[in-house]
Structures are given as C-alpha cells and as structure tokens.
Amino acid sequence: MVAVDVIETQLGIGQRRIPGPANVAIGRYRIERLIGGGGWGLVYAARHEILNKPVALKVLRPDLVADPAHAQRFLREARIAATLHHENIVDITDFGDEGSPYLVMELLRGRTLMSVVREQGMLPWTRVIGILVQLARALACAHAQGVVHRDLKPGNIMLDDSSGVDRIKLCDFGLSRLSSGDDRITASGYFVGTPAYMAPEQILGMVTDARGDLYALGVTGFELLTGSLPYVATNPVTLVAEIISERRAYLRDRIPKEVPDALVAVIEQCLAVDPDKRPAGAQQIEAALLAIASPAPPAFDLAGQIIGNYRITKVLGAGGSGSVWLAEHASIGTKVAVKILRPEIAFIPGAAERFVNEARAASLISSPHIARYLDIGRLPSGQLYAILEYLAGETVFERLAHDVRMPVHQVATIARQVASALVPAHAAGIVHRDLKPENVFLMSVADEDVAKVLDFGIAKMGTGSGPQTQLGYFVGTVHYCPPEQILGDAAGPAADVYALGATMFHMLVGHAPFTGDATEVASAKTVRAAPRVRIAREDVPEPLASLVDAMLARNAADRPTMAEVFERLGRRESIAPKAPVAVAVAAPAAPLAATPSTMFASFEVRRSRTGVLVLAAAAVIAALVLVVWTPWQSAARPAVAPPATPVLPPIAAPPTPTTPTSPPKTAPPAKVSPPVAHLAPPKPSAPPRPIKHVKPPPPPPSPPPAPPPVKPDVPDVMIADPYGAQ
Amino acid sequence: MTDPRLGSTIRDYLLIERLAATGVAATYRATGPSGDVALKLYDGAGVPEPDATLAVQRELHHPAVARLVDAGELDDGGLFLATEWIDGTPLSALVARRSSWESIRRIVGAIGSGLGALHARGVVHRDLKPSDVIVPARHACAAVIVDASPALRDGVAEPPVGIVHATAPYAAPERAAGRPVDGRADLYALGMIMFQLLTGRFPDEGDRDAELRKVPPVAQALCAWLLECDRDARLPNAHVLAVTIGATASELGAMSGATVEARTPA
C-alpha cells in the first residue's frame, strides 16, 4: 500500500483524529481509509466506484458541518483550487455535497514536508533549492491567477521523492483567497493561520497580499535548511512578538556554512518585515534560486577516467549546473568536450529532461553551425553527461569586446551561418528564443570565422509546464529579443529573426539597437521602432542595411523569414564586394589554436551582463569538417547581379554536417573546385570547395528537401543551458 | 439602602435591580419592551455627550460586546444607555478566585476580540475594568464587554478636567502623561485584568515579575507584553492578540506549524 499522508496539518488541542468510515460511499466515491486530518477536513483515500480510480477525498469534519462558514470555506477552496493547474499544485477534480461538502483531489504519493523535516531535520541545500524552485513556481501560478494561498507551510506541501527526484505539490487552498476579491468571508468569521509561517503584516491584521506567501516561502526554506524556524522564541507569545518585531536574529549564523550565501540572501529577503523589501514576486525567487551557482570548481577530479571511448584529460570549466572536461578518444585521439551535470541538479525539476531535450533538439537540427552532440548517458554515479564536439574560439560577445565594429563581410558571413542553422530549426518547429552575441560562438578556422549557435532552444525561465506567456514569464534577453517577447506574446520564428537582426546590428554598429538598462530597453522597444542601421554606420551596403532594418521590424509579420534572411545574405550585393563569405569550411579536425578556456572564462562575464535570465552556457568544441561556401571570391567584382537571381544553394538544404570519416556530400551547388588558398590546409580527403562564381550559380538541381516530416516532440523545449554548466 | 428609583419606570424600562454606581452614573437591571437590559443612568450633567460613538456601538454586532439597544436623554438632561442584558457573572466577582489558565485564556481572548471590534471602528474604551465584563453563563463568547460607555473616538483628547474616566490601576501609563490614548491603552487595561485573573491581585510595586513567575510561561509572556509601560513595546493591536491567543491554544502547534483559529475583531 502506498504510504500516503495527505495535506496534513498537525491537529491542535481539542482536535482529534476521527476514525474513518471505511467502505462507506460518498457520492460516487468509496472510502477506503483515513489518511490525514487537518484543521477542518478529514482526508480519505477513496476510489471512484465506476472508474476504479484512486483519489483523495476531503470532507468537512463532522463536528463543523453545522457551521455554514466552514462549508463556505470548503467550497471556496474547491473553486479556487480548481482554477489552478500546475504540476506543483494539487489537482482538484470534483466537488460535491452529500449532507456535508467534500472535494476530490488527486491521490498523492509521499509525505508532507513537515513530516520530512521532523524525521530528517535539515535537508541538504541542493535539495532545498529544488523544492523551493517548485514552490516558487506553484506560487507564481497561483498569484498570476490572483490567488493568495495565505497558509503556506511545510504541512501543506507534499513531497514525493520516490523517483529519486523531489516533486512537490502545494495543497490546501482552504485559506486562500482571490487577492482581488472580496474579503468578507474572513473578516466576518474566524481568523485562521499558522503563526510561525505568517508574515508580520498578516499578524498585525493589515492587508495581506501575495507577498505574505513569499514570506512563508522564506520561513519554509529556512526550516528545510536548518530543521528549525527562523525565530529564537521559545513560546508562542514571544514567537508572535518576534515575528512582528523589526529585529531578526542573524539568520546566516544558524544556517550551515556550506549553504551558499546567495541562497541565504534569498531566504533573508523573503523574511523581510517590510513587504516592499521582499522579492517582487515568486518568479524572481525562482530565477534567483536557479541562478545560484556553485562557487567552487568541481569537487571531484575526473581526469584519467574513461567515459565511453573517451579518456578525460582535463577540466575546461565549471559552472553552476555542471562541469566541462576535455577528453580524447582512447584510440584515435579525437578531442571532445564532456559536459557533466552536477548530481544535485537532478533535483531541480526538469533539469535532467532539459539536458536530454537540448541534446535531442540540437541533434534534430542538422547543421554544422550548431554544436553537435555525439553521445549522452549516465556515469556509474548516476550523473548525466553529454559528449559534444570540442570548440575553441570565442563568442561574438567576446569578439565585440575588442573589436567594436566588425567588418561588414564578417557580419554577413557570421549571420548567414547562423541563419543556416536556424532555417532547419524553424522547419523542425524549434525556436531558439535567446539569440544574442553571447550565444554565437566563433571558431577560427584558417583565419575564417565559423559560427556555432549555442544554447539552442533556450527557454530559461519557463515554469516547466504550461504556457509561459500566460504566466507572464519573460524568456529571452531584453536587448536582443523582439518587442512581442517582452510583451509576453508567443515567441515564434520571427523572434529569432529579430534577435539575429539585433545581433547583426550590434556587430555592425557596436551596440544593440536599443541601449540602456533592461527596463529602459524593454519600454523603448515596445513603443519605438529600432534605429536604422545606416544612420549609425554609413558604410553598410544598402541591401544589408535594409535587410537588418526589415529584420528589426516591430511587427513580427513584417519581418522576413529566416529562409529569406539566409537567401538575402547570400546575395552578393548584400555585402562589401571584396568579402568572401564563408558559410562552412571543410577542415578535417582542424588544429585548435584558440584557447579553449576563453569560452569558459566567459561564464562570469556573461552572467553579470545579462542577469538572471541568462544562465550562461558554455560550449566546447572540436573543429569538424566544414564546408566552405564562397560564392564571391572575386573581390573586385561590383555587386551588380540582379537581386532576383538566386545565388545560393537551396535554403532548405543548408550545408550538412560532416565528419572526418564521412566527408561532406553536400555541397554548394556550383561545380567548382579549386581550393581556396587561405582556408584550412587542404587535405586529400577534403571535399571540394567551391569558391568562385563568374555567373550566378544555377538553381539547385532538385527541389529542396522537405522539412523534417515529424515535428519533434520537443518543439518548445525548456532547455536550460545546453551546455549548461550554469 | 434602597434606591428610590427601583421599581419605577424610566423611558419604558422598569428598574428591577441596582447593579453599580459611580460618581456620575448608576446602573440597573431593567425590563423593557425588548426584554431585559442593563440601564445606565447618568446624572444631570449629561456625561458623556451623545455622539457618534453611540451610533457605532448601536451598529456593532459582535458577540463579545453587548449591544446598545437604546440611548437618549432623560428629563433632567442626563443620558441613559440601555444595553443588551447578558446573564452571567461579572468578571469583578471572578478576579479573586483563581481560574484555570485555559479559562483565563479564553476570557482574555474574548475581551480582546471585543476591544478589537471597537478599535476597528475608531473607538477606544478608555476605562476597561473587570466590572465592565460579564462572563456569561451561556453565550458564544467567554466574556462580554457590557459597558463601553466611556468610549470615545480614538485619539480624541481627554474630556474636561473633573471628569475621571479611567479607573486607577487599569489606566495605562500614557494616560498619566495626559497623552491622547489609542487602542493600546485598552490592551494595557486588559493586561491588568489578566494579571488579576492569574494572580488574584493587583501587581504591587516591584513584585510584578515575581508574581508572574508562578504562572505558565505563555501566560506570563502574554501578560507582561500587555503590561508594557512603553506602549510602543506593548502588544500592538487586538489582531495580534487574536493571533497570539490562537497560538497559545496549541503551544506545540504554534511553534511547529499547526493552524490556529482565533476570533478576530469584526
């Protein structure tokens, strides 16, 4: 029998458990046994008689049935809870009245956090973060619906850790109320609450809003971390006095040293006496918790270990969510990067799924301009790892730090490569949603930039379920995302077009289209059009400038599609005449001169620049075989080709990734072969590299292949950071 | 001594029994058109002025405050107040007996919720004492404030000199300073009543803490908080009192997560 102890609040004096009427039917439900009892309710395990579905059935305590206020509260709980659908909130499935009201909930496994704390005392902080993140998500959902719980405490939170991962459900909305609604129900009757988890303003009888729940979250967090309340009081009277006093016993001293200061800071902020000093909302708490990075490098040394066919040689970097290691194939020496998720990250809901989803999404989009996953699996310790191609180079963000305005041809090259990765992504239903200079990695191969899109499919601040826009989450990075993303509308493929446009603008002009702090940018972006490129930089060729301007259209429908962007960037007149545009470079196992550590060194920088929305990603990489595409070798040629003439290979067939062992089959449409001198050292196995067109190339011989027929089941993946060491 | 007014009828009320008298008023049990009332008759000077607080008391429906059913001016210019008759024992008769902490807790909680109801309407009792409170024989509440007549608007300055509303031991220290009072003065008076209920006596100079040490720590802490001389350090309002009383109902629970219920001022 599953151990269930539901929604239990400790019974106070004068309240006792009332034995359950086994085998009695209430409505369509047959009672099986009593599993819990709270202030007003008794909770039974029951079963739907016809569907045979196990449920939890909560009935009003028999001695309270006579009081209409209790019945009303019951009904209110049912109504309010039924409006909330979230994986971290218990589902109410039915309500009825058979002489006394009852409500039917999903039958939960596990125990209350209160009994967990009683048994285990404190929990490891890594677990606490996972629990609090889920709690914050549940509250964000409720608060977004205008529901304030008002009795949040460990006794109302169910924890199921049977799968090895903590899953929580927030229960008992019996005291909750619609924050916008009418207060009379509580004003006229009894005041009810749990003093130890009540916010000062709640005890003082002032209006309580959602911030009271944030306070309770802080108390709960402190209790999980320490096994005790954040107060030093020894009796209820001094407890109440302590809660409303402006003094707070120094909390840090009572929390174990190994708990990161950032986590303590979140708890302390939640426990502020002044509600205005608490975090602005549950989402902010969630974001702050997710951003808490491990301050220490990996505590374990994996050097010398064998993972699959690879031997780990050294650590490349470490971040909040894991570490990245350089490894070599044991027999052939191929270098790869191995990303290992920190074990405790598994407790952050969805993290493991995101890790896998990211790999799946990246693999679905076959493009040489996306860091490639070679394998994914679990170490004997249970930690997830992924093997990726090893990249060396720097991000556009880093490049821009020392190269304020990039040459036009470089911008066009990089942008086209990025577009070539996004075209198939969009065809597969995957939207990047967080394209920006930090997420475009530049490998230097024979003096040519080869772009790799990082953090593919990012959707950092998602709830893990439900439409994010409904909950008002902002996903993306404000300087590069389109206005509709700021406004909370769904971010479709056009969002990536805008973000690429903004990134190109930055590369060309030296700053993003809108500058200032995030708030200024967000508001400016929603009311004003982006400035025109040529105003900021005159030497940008008109076709390229107008393309960027079009990509930055405020209205998503006015922007070109990514395929059009790719195509227009391929037109020779788009860029300065002398620039060869490399889209892909064939270079077998290219030597990696750049220091790999630059990528990882960038973690801190990026995080500080972009705030909590960006849990920076790392990337790694090995140079692979790349296919070069240089239609404009003729530097001196003026850009005269008629725009209508298609110059480029079919968009739907962007260069396909190749490996040293399987040379590229794709190729640029034109049949030209002389290798370009400045490219990577030619090797016998190198594929032919088209370089020069005297005439526009003929149209592709065959129609572009259809986009992948099946949408991936991870179209809108919540991918935390793909590389993920945050 | 027989009161000549007993047996007479004043404004539809037949005076049955003399209950108490002060320098300015006498209180009787009387029978009127809607049943028994406690009838308070002020001497001719007409104290207090009938004002908005009477309307508040008349409108107030709270189980811990006896309802004002009638009020008006007598022929001699004095005021009469008729409040709902509550059958029970005046608290003044109980203070000498030792009650259990549990019953004291409930009485203090009930008085606190009644005060809260007055305070929520901007009214301060200003002269709370055991004789103003009845512990009813049968009632929803453990105690009922039957006489709220000295109540004045929150923050209103003291009435003119010569009219003493406060009863010495129950008067909060800030009264002595002549400062306008607020609800916390009533909470001080309640603390004094609680002290009497707990110890059977008034605190003497200096032995207050020693006396309190004999009572349960929770009661001790609550009483001491109510009797804080500095009103900024005193228990701040009736809502906090309701929460605290609720918390003391389940001492263990309050410290570890039980939901408590307490009557809140309405």
Image: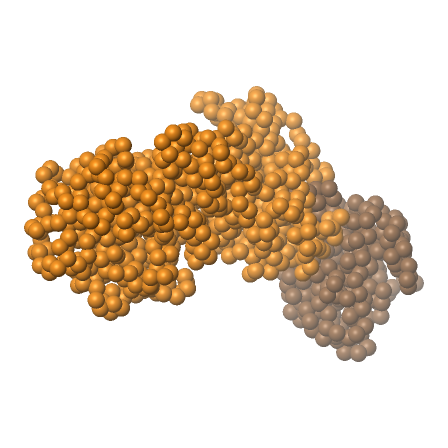
Chain colours: A orange, B brown
Identified at 11% across, 58% down, the residue is A637
Q: Quadrant of residue A14?
A: top right
Identified at 9% across, 44% down, the residue is A699
Query: Looking at the picture, how far across and down is residue B83, in whole percent?
Result: 72, 59
Whether residue A252 is situated above or below residue A303 in the rendered picture: below
From the image, which quarter does the N terminus of chain A lie in? Answer: top right
Q: Nearer the viewer, residue B231 or B59?
A: B231
Query: Looking at the picture, how far across and down is residue B199, in whole percent?
Result: 88, 53
Is residue B94 shown to the viewer in this render?
no
Whether residue A362 is situated above or below residue A607 in the rendered picture: above
Query: Looking at the picture, how far across and down is residue A165, in whole percent?
Result: 52, 34
Is residue B98 shown to the viewer in this render?
yes
Identified at 26% across, 51% down, the residue is A448
Q: How many badges with numbers are in the image?
A: 0
Query: Looking at the picture, how far across and down is residue A577, in whole percent?
Result: 16, 59
Q: Nearer the viewer, residue B204 or B210?
A: B210
In this view, the residue farthest toward the bottom is B161
Q: Going by the image, does A674 lie left or right of A499?
A: left
Q: Going by the image, does A425 lie left or right of A726?
A: left
Identified at 52% across, 30% down, the residue is A381
